[in-house]
Amino acid sequence: MERPAGHTGATPAAARAGLSIRTRALLVSLVLLAIPFVGYGYVREMERVLQAAQEQAVIGTARAVATALHDRPRLLDRRVDPVAGDAGYPRGTTVAATQEIELIIRGLRRSGSRIWVIDQDRRLLVLEGSLRQDAKPAVEPDLWDRIQGTVLGPLFALLLERPREDFEDALPEDVLSGGRAVDNALTGVPATRWRETADKRAVILAAAHPIWNGPEVIGAVVVEETTNRVLSLRNRAFEQLLTTTLGVFVLGALVLFLFATRISRRLTRLRDEAEHAIDARGRVHRAFRAERDRDEIGDLSRSFATVLDRLADYNDYLERMADRLSHELRTPIAVVSSSLDNLRIGPAPAGSQVYIQRAEEGVRRLNAILTRMSEARRLAETLKGTERERFDLGRVVAGCVAGYVAAFPQYRFELRLPKAPVELEGAPDLVAQLLDKLVDNARDFCAPGEPIEIAVDVEWDWARLAVSNVGPALPDAMAGQIFESMVSVRPAGGGAERPRGEPHLGLGLFIARLIAEFHGGKAIARNRPDGRGVVVEVLMPLAGAALPAPPAPR
Amino acid sequence: MSRRIAIVEDDAAIRENVADTLRRQGYDATTHADRKSALAAFRARLPDLAIVDIGLGDEPDGGFTLVRELRALSETLPIIFLTARDSDLDLVSGLRLGADDYLTKTISMPHLLARIAALFRRVDVLRSPPKSEEAIERGPLRLDLKRMTATWRGTPVDLTLTEFWMVHALVKYPGHVKNRDQLMSEANLVVDDGTITSHIKRIRKKFLAADGAFEAIDTVYGMGYRWIEAPGAA
């Protein structure tokens, strides 16, 4: 409840707590992340197709080699050569046979595939080729590849299994002896088998095909390939997919973010403008700029502008009400007062004089009311044509206070002035009128025996004129409004307490405000820090506050 | 022969009240409710003084038009605006059209009579050759109290009746501060403070037009105004 008056009504920024439009837009853009997942499924499907194709190719190669060796038992029959070396390596007289097999295989083999031929006894006759891929010629990576490699490389390394060429490719014993594919082939049935290398670094696809000699199986051809080729194809596809979708995601999110930023900026501006269009006192300024955009926000802004315009019109109407009323009442009052004048001048029935006097007193008061009512409007007119001059606020205030001391001996005035002159740019007459109003107001509320304090001081580029009195505090609700036209916080029927008998319309502080605003300043009313009364302050910029150097004398 | 005063006013009650007051004072008052009938009557015979309202019936500025036409008929006829409109703009345009005074309807009948009498006095003095003059001289200022005219260093300063009375109130006791209430009563006016301020401003401007170095009217903030004897002129 201790907050100073005149600073109420600002919308707390906390109203914006929760998710901003921008954050929401970013969340929405996360939907785009579904694309890579869908793409991943397709890539997996492609991998399966490629694997099937590879299998077929490997089987084909095995069949082709086997077919070339069909019905040529001489090449395989090691039994004719008892000198055959250990571990079934061809030796001696079979060298020619081995060379022939190798020749056949070389004609049919695929790069990256290893072909071996075994006989019925699972002795290895020929081993040709290597499972390792031929090293590709190094291609100079272009800029894009490098960027991609730098930015996304770690991600790919995390997500994708790189095919490796440093796997263990020795023929494990169990493959030779117990591989099911080989078993099947040696019984006459072509078979394939996937197996991992011993070090589990690669997967090897092996296809075995029997070699027939008439109805008899005399050996088998085993073609092996790693799945690395398919793997790298899959990886390439997946990398491209990921790169593209991430690019789209980033781009989409960026666009969405910019769009949301623009919308949220427009909304923020709209909010700020709408907030500033009505000040703490509820007065409408016409400064609201409607947007021209032909979308919903522009629409909202325009409708705000319309609403504010109507409100401003209504405020204007209210402010001019007093003036119009005074104008309309002036003629009938003139009728009454001129009639009374005639009555007084002419022969009047005995005893009527006292009534005439009372009626005249009533008319006089009515006239005073009317004059006050149109004072604000007349002041506004005066302000339009007023020429500004440089004057010392201290001298004006001192003069006025000397006048008050003479005019109102029943009140005590305490004046505090700075030693240096306080130069303002404006109309000294008007400032005197402003002080009249402030003092008038202070006199109305001042507790008997207490002084009315009038102070002038300088704060930065501002001159402060403060009139303070001991008396009832301001009701909180009225703090921002007492500078409005026809607003008064005087208690109902307060006129009875006023010995001066002047009517009060709540126009005094309104006039003070108009004059303060004319000087580029503002008027603030608040309760005194000690809580014993009210201080009304007027802040006005010092002369040349914006242009510190006064014009040099010639 | 009693003087003829024409009242042009659309509100019957005010018209008749003013007419009654004037008749009681021995004037011959004629009344007109609208511009056309008034103008027709003026063409037939000019009154000695005219009191004109600005808004006449359905013509909001009918009074202004009428005064313009009336000025064309006679340059010397005293004209008073008596109106409910009290804006500075109306006041200035009224005086610029050649009216001798501009009064709002809040004026009391005695004040009105004082002004009418003053205007007639001025007309009389202007007509008759100057005799023993009643005048106040303050340095370069000379106020002719009969003609109610002012000259500054020999240059005539064209003041309205209200302005003349205010200047007179100030120069009667040079150096004494006159507050706004005193100025009002001297000028037979009931207006608000702001109007006094703008009257003083207009007076200053008129003197400044005659003499660019004029600064004899001093503002005493919060109290009023005073006349300073120009030190150079003494």
Image (cartoon, coloured by chain):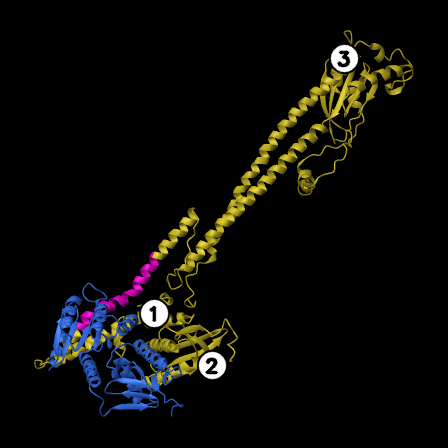
Element marked by disc 3 = helix
Q: Is residue A326 magenta?
A: yes
Foreground label between 3 and 1: 1
Q: Nearer the viewer, residue A490 or B118?
A: B118
Kind of residue at disc 3: Thr
Q: Residue B61's x, y, as percent?
A: 23, 66
- Report the residue that reaches farthest toward the left: A349
Above or below — where is B15 with respect to B153? Answer: above
Residue matched to label 2: A421
Horizontally, residue A142 falls left or right of residue A271, namely right
Q: Looking at the image, which residue is at 90% across and 12% down?
A: A81
Does residue A268 appear left or right of residue A190 in this picture?
left
Between B79 and A485, the one lying in front of the other is B79
Instruction: Please report, as a chain letter, where disc 1 is located.
Output: A
Dividing the picture into quarters, in which one does residue B45 lie? bottom left
The yellow-coloured chain is labelled: A
Q: Chain of mark 2?
A: A
Which amino acid does the dot numbered 1 rest on?
Ala
Q: Is residue A254 above or below residue B7?
A: above
Q: Amino acid at mark 2?
A: Pro
Figure quadrant of the N terminus of chain A: bottom left
Mark 2 or mark 1: which comes first in sequence? 1
**Range of magenta residues:** A310-335
Q: Quick one: which residue is furthest to the top in this view?
A: A214
The x, y position of residue A76, in whole percent, is 84, 13
Secondary structure under the numbered disc 2 in the rendered image: loop
Whether discs 3 and 1 lie on one chain: the answer is yes
* Tag 1 residue: A380
Residue A517: percent from left, percent from top: 40, 69
Overall secondary structure of the magenta stretch?
helix
